[in-house]
Amino acid sequence: MLTTASKIRPKPPQPKPFQPAKQLRWAAARELHIRQMKLTELPTKLRSLAVGSLALTSSLLPSSAADPVRDDSASEKLGIKLSIQCYTYRAITFYETVDKAAKMGIKYLEIYPGQMLKPDSPVKIGSDMSDEVCAEIQAKLAAAGGEKIVAFGVAPIPNDEPAAAPLALGRPMEH
């Protein structure tokens, strides 16, 4: 037998309405508090993590002229050549990119059309470069420790042979 008290069920508690402004204020306040914390106020684990990250980062940076030389012989035996795409450094000139690659121990470069050749020069990398410019590039690559160009692109390839003649750029750039 059912009584009226057993028929009435209490309503489940209703979730609080979503208050994005309040939650955003809380997140902003927490972020501001974290920014204002000093390293000495951080918990021990977080402090040791920060110190460890700093040590790892500083160990990855070049420290002196006595840094070990990269040994890519194993990967090169497999036909794998670690190279750098010069477009990554499109904000600087090709000559500066060669210097950066040499500093990192990277021996192979992928050039792209349109990068400025060197500071204070209007010449740009492209399939229409003169033999003199190609010779300058070869000299720069040799001076940087024997860097080599392994790719050129992205450049459109014309369908007719006379228009594709300037794409013989690879021939004077070979070592």
Image (tube, rainbow, N blue to C red):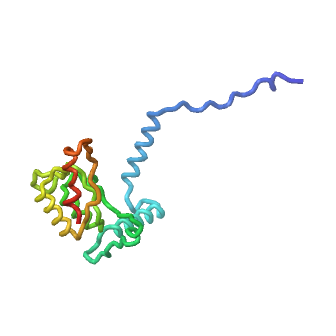
Q: Given the current orientation, which residue lies at the most extreme front position?
A: 161
Residue 99 drawn at (x, y percent): 21, 64
Residue 17 pos. (x, y %): 54, 30
- The reply, left or right, for residue 2 in relation to residue 151 is right
The residue that appears at 46% across and 35% down in the rendered structure is 22
Q: Which one is nearer the viewer's eye here, 23 or 90?
A: 90
Going 85% across and 23% down the picture, which residue do you hit?
Answer: 3
Most extreme residue toward the right is 1
- Coordinates of residue 119 in the picture (x, y in percent): 12, 56
| Foreground residue among 28 and 60 | 60
Quarter where residue 141 is shown = bottom left
Quarter of the picture holding the N terminus: top right
Residue 86 at x, y = what percent?
26, 55
Residue 156 vs 54, above or below: the answer is above
Determine whether 76 is above or below 155 in the image.
Answer: below
Question: Going by the picture, which residue comes out furthest to the top?
Answer: 4
Residue sitting at x 18%, y 52%: 125
Quadrant (top left, top right, bottom left, bottom right) of the C terminus: bottom left
Q: On the rendered structure, is 6 left or right of 91?
A: right
Q: How many marks?
A: 0
Q: Left or right: where does residue 118 sit relative to residue 60? A: left
Toward which corner of the image does residue 76 lie, by quadrant? Answer: bottom left
